[in-house]
Image (spheres, rainbow, N blue to C red):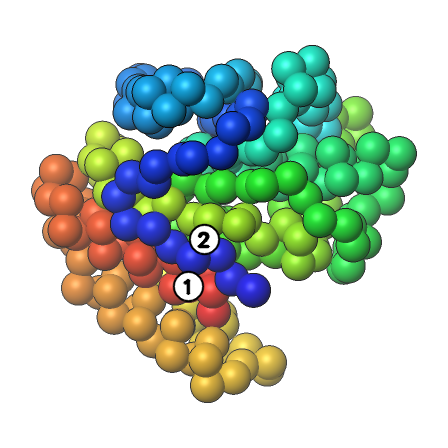
């Protein structure tokens, strides 16, 4: 099933240790995790952060984050960032679920099978839709071969759509990620395996993008436009 989307903040009540997986820091990314960390601290939920994920996450990123997960006896994962952070989080979850199988052995379709630890996705860009998809794209650090892992357990349990974490996105990234979401929606609408549900999600995504992308680009502090772009990305991912 698709993850429920949550507008704004999510209050966590689990007595668990969380592993947060973030993107490599850019100047606009600094400080974005402050509110999340405060919620976790105020709720007495211990956590550890992995912040070395690169664009197109590698097997090394996954291995490093997995080591942190086990060293700290974590029980849940938050993927916080763009598609790369969420894909890395999914891959870490897959390795937790199948500790004796390499990521390369899971590439393709329906090779994971097992339930992942609690996985929460918090997208900081409005484009990849990774917060609702069953795919994780990983790069082999040695061969540079890129491959996808596709299975239903990779769909995050929750997707938190908080426009505040997208307010500092530069216009260029706002535009490119918005076009990414539009591409996903159009592909889903014209594909050979569409259903009435996928077409509706794709249509809703396209409408939201046409109504809000220009505003989000020209006025990055417009919270309503940012919220609607996150919804568009979510719908496009669902489609």
Residue 129 is tagged as 2
Whether residue 41 is situated above or below residue 132 in the rendered picture: above
Callout 1: few (<14), some (14-19), or many (20+) C-alpha neighbours within 10 Å? many
Q: Nearer the viewer, residue 1 or 132?
A: 1
Q: Earlier in the sequence, mark 1 or mark 2?
A: 2
Whether residue 239 is situated above or below residue 229 in the rendered picture: below
Q: Are marks 1 and 2 in contact (CB under 8 Å)?
A: yes
Instruction: Report whether 2 appears left or right of 219.
Output: right
**Residue 208 in which image quadrant:** bottom left
**In x, y percent, where is residue 168?**
22, 30
Q: Quadrant of the N terminus?
A: bottom right
Residue 236 is tagged as 1
**In x, y percent, where is residue 99?**
83, 33
Instruction: Report whether 167 appears left or right of 31.
Output: left
Residue furthest to the top in view is 71
Residue name at image x 75 percent, y 35 percent: 95
Whether residue 101 is situated above or below residue 149 in the rendered picture: above
**Residue 197 in which image quadrant:** bottom left
**In x, y percent, where is residue 196?**
46, 86
Residue furthest to the bottom in view is 196
Residue name at image x 56 percent, y 41 percent: 119
Count up the numbered dots: 2
SS at mark 1? helix
Residue name at image x 46 percent, y 22 percent: 45
**In x, y percent, where is residue 160?**
37, 45
Callout 2: few (<14), some (14-19), or many (20+) C-alpha neighbours within 10 Å? many
Residue name at image x 34 percent, y 76 percent: 203
Residue 62 is tagged as none
Q: Nearer the viewer, residue 195 or 41?
A: 41
């Amino acid at each position: 099933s698709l993850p429920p989307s949550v507008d704004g903040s999510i209050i966590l009540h689990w007595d668990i240790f969380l592993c947060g997986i973030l993107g490599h820091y850019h100047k606009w990314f600094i400080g974005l995790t402050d509110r999340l960390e405060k919620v976790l601290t105020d709720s007495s939920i211990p956590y550890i952060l992995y912040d070395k994920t690169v664009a197109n996450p590698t097997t090394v990123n996954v291995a490093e984050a997995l080591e942190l997960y086990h060293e700290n006896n974590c029980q849940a994962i938050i993927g916080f960032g763009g598609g790369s952070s969420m894909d890395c989080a999914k891959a870490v979850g897959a390795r937790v679920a199948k500790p004796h199988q390499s990521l390369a052995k899971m590439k393709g379709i329906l090779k994971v099978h097992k339930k992942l630890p609690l996985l929460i996705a918090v997208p900081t860009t409005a484009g990849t839709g990774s917060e609702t998809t069953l795919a994780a794209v990983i790069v082999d650090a040695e061969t540079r071969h890129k491959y996808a892992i596709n299975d239903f357990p990779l769909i995050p349990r929750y997707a938190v759509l908080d426009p505040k974490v997208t307010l500092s996105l530069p216009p260029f990234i706002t535009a490119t990620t918005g076009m990414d979401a539009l591409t996903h929606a159009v592909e889903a609408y014209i594909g050979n395996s569409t259903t009435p549900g996928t077409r509706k999600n794709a249509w809703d995504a396209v409408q939201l993008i046409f109504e809000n992308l220009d505003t989000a680009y020209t006025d990055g502090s417009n919270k309503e436009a940012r919220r609607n772009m996150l919804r568009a990305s979510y719908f496009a991912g669902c489609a």
